Structures are given as C-alpha cells and as structure tokens.
Image: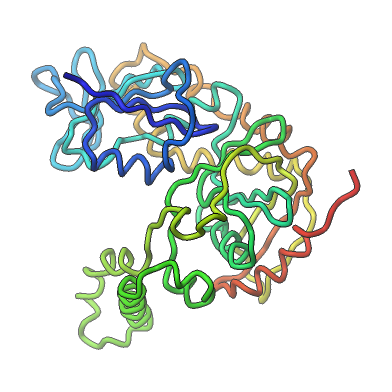
Amino acid sequence: MSTTIRHSVPGLGTVALVNASERHLRAVSAALGPPDGEPGELDDLTVRFVDRVPAGPGLTRLGGSAAYDGERFYLVGEGGALAAVELARAGEPLEIVCERRLPEVPLLLPLLAVRLAATGRVLLHAAAFRYRGRGVLVAGWQGGGKSETLLPFMAHGAEHLADEWTVVDPAGTMVGVRSHVQVWDWQLRQLPALRPHLPLLARAQMRVAATALQAADGRRLGGLDGVLDLLRPGLEHHARRSMAPDVLFGDRAGRGETPIDIALLAVVADRPQTTVRPVAAADIAARMPASLVHERRELLDAYAMYRFAFPDRRSAILEAGFEDERRVLEAALSDADTGLVEHPKPLALEALFAAVEPFCAARRAR
C-alpha cells in the first residue's frame, strides 16, 4: 500500500512524496523548509521511491552520472543508484522515480525552479528579511555575500525570510524558501548574539575544525599537510552547522508574502571596506539570470545528456533559455530601492551592517 505525503511550501508549490522514508522527508524539509502551505490542485513534482528502478537490459552509459535505454533516461547516483526522469517535461508537472538508496532527490530545486519559471515567477538565489518594516532582498553570485548580509541584520533584530532561495513575483512581492541556514564558526565568533542558539558541544566542534582549517591554510602543521588535505572535506563540514530558521532565530523566523522594498546585489570586491551605492533595477535584473544558469548547471548538464540520448525529445523552456526571468525580475524590482553592495573578504560583519543599514533604513519618496 502506497503512502503519499504532500510537502507544500508557500510560493514554491507542492511536492508529492510517495513511499518516502523518514530520511528522505528530512532531506526535503532541509532543502525546502517545513511543509506549511495548503497543497495545490496539481502536484508540481511527484517523487516516487522504489527499491529498484526497472531499467531495460543493456543500459547505455553517459559517463558515470547518466544512462538511458530505449524508453527512459536515468540519473546515476552513488553506488549506481538510479532515478528516472523525463526531462522533456521540465517546466510541467512531472514525476521522478527514485531508488531509496539515493540520499536525496536529484535535481529537486532546479526542477522546481524551472516549474516556477513556466508559471511566470523566479526562484532567485537570494537571501531575504524584513528590517524596520521593509522587505529586503539580497541577491548575488554564489559566495557573493548574501548570508553574510543577512546574519548581522538578524543580530540587530531583523525578521528572517530566506537564507538561500527566494521566490520572486513580477508584482513586486517575494516569498522566502525556509530551508536550513548554514552557520560557520567565524560568523558565530563575530556575532555573539547567535551563539546561544547552538549547543555548547556543537560550538566547540566547530571551533576545533575551524582552527585546524586555519592552520592548514597557513601551513603551520609541518608534515601533516597531506593528511589535512584528505581531512579537509570533513573539517569544513564540522566547521559549520545546518539549522532550521525556527531554531536559530526563534519567533523572528518569518514567513508569508512580503513586498520587495529594497533589492541589493552583493559582490566581493578588492577594496578595503564595504561600500553601497544606488544601481538601476534593470542592472540587477540583467545580471541575475546568469547566476540562475550557473545554479542550474547540474540540470542543464543532465538535459544535454538527455538530448544526446533522445534527440527528438525537447523541453521548450530549457531550450528557450531564461530571458523571461530577466523580464520578471525587472518588473518585480521596478518599485524597489536598488543598490550594489561591494565588500571585501575576509568580512567584518558588523562593518558590513554599518555600511548597508542606512540604505535599508532610508525611505524613498514614492
């Protein structure tokens, strides 16, 4: 007997999980946030978990990450685990048939992003928060400083909406995807107000891992350099914690639709201090689709392999590119105060807040 659980997230849509394990339910919640919306009339994505995906004999392999037979296309995970997905239907409601041994659902966020694009919205790589009654959106390239802008504002009383992904509507509103927040040891050391929300043991583990990484970067470990290189992925994992917004921010973990009053583009620049200056909304809207393509590279690579396997099958939205998303962003940001935040690395988070806060606190005459 099959069991279907509908994971519905405001703004993002509904993912139907059929015969999912507790482990997969937790993984989906970490990626999308808790299911706190009403299910839609139609599931945007259905994930059906099975012990074994019934593939045809003699699969044709495309490297180690994909395969196909006469009928279906498969993503190949660790240990050869398969997930079948018909990528010609990207942008439409579709189904992934996923073997249980896969640790997470492949292409979950990229496929939801393309589904949103098909319905006239954008899943933007952006942090979002409310500050002094104003909705603030912080977009940028991966590693550009979105979370680093969010966290000091949280330490100064802001209301969290999103750390990583935000759904943007052309009407000028946004809904934060309440996925888990990544907090690093160096951020806790600069923002003491966040420390009480993490257990003492967790903070100690983060500090030890961060100290080892710092020593490795400074090459102060003598003959242990090679060992440290092998241990680096584990150390990086332990130097940070993934936490639900409700745990980290308590009653300041917000939700719901919010007007975009301020939109910031955050970038790393070779300069001694953080600067903020006005920039045209069209400039942000023109740049961010390139970031979206970068974020979807796993999906786009899979689609290229899919087209190799089935050259007569096409996804209209993946073939068309993402010019429509630029137009959505330009409309969404047209009434916002828009600015460019240029900051150095390593970052002083309180200095970042001091530079950005006046821009966010000011009210432009409408």
Q: Quadrant of residue 96?
A: top left
| For residue 200, above or below residue 333 | below
The quarter of the image holding the N terminus is: top left
- Furthest-front residue in this view: 251
Q: What sort of colour scheme is used for the picture? A: rainbow
Q: Nearer the viewer, residue 320 or 246?
A: 246
| Identity of the residue drawn at 39% across and 33% down | 299
Q: Position of residue 184 (x, y in %)?
A: 43, 67
- Furthest-left residue in this view: 57
Tally the marks.
Answer: 0
Q: Nearer the viewer, residue 128 or 114?
A: 128
The quarter of the image holding the C terminus is: top right
Q: Nearer the viewer, residue 259 or 229?
A: 259
Q: Position of residue 256 (x, y in %)?
A: 59, 39
Q: Is residue 127 left or right of residue 359?
A: left
Q: Quadrant of residue 108?
A: top left
Q: Position of residue 170 (x, y in %)?
A: 69, 30
Q: Position of residue 78 (x, y in %)?
A: 18, 42
| Identity of the residue drawn at 35% across and 70% down | 199
| Identity of the residue drawn at 30% across and 23% down | 85
Q: Is residue 133 visible?
A: yes
| Identity of the residue drawn at 34% across and 31% down | 302
- Furthest-right residue in this view: 365
Q: Quadrant of residue 227?
A: bottom left
Q: Is residue 251 left or right of residue 76?
A: right
Q: Nearer the viewer, residue 183 or 155?
A: 155
Q: Is residue 290 visible?
A: no
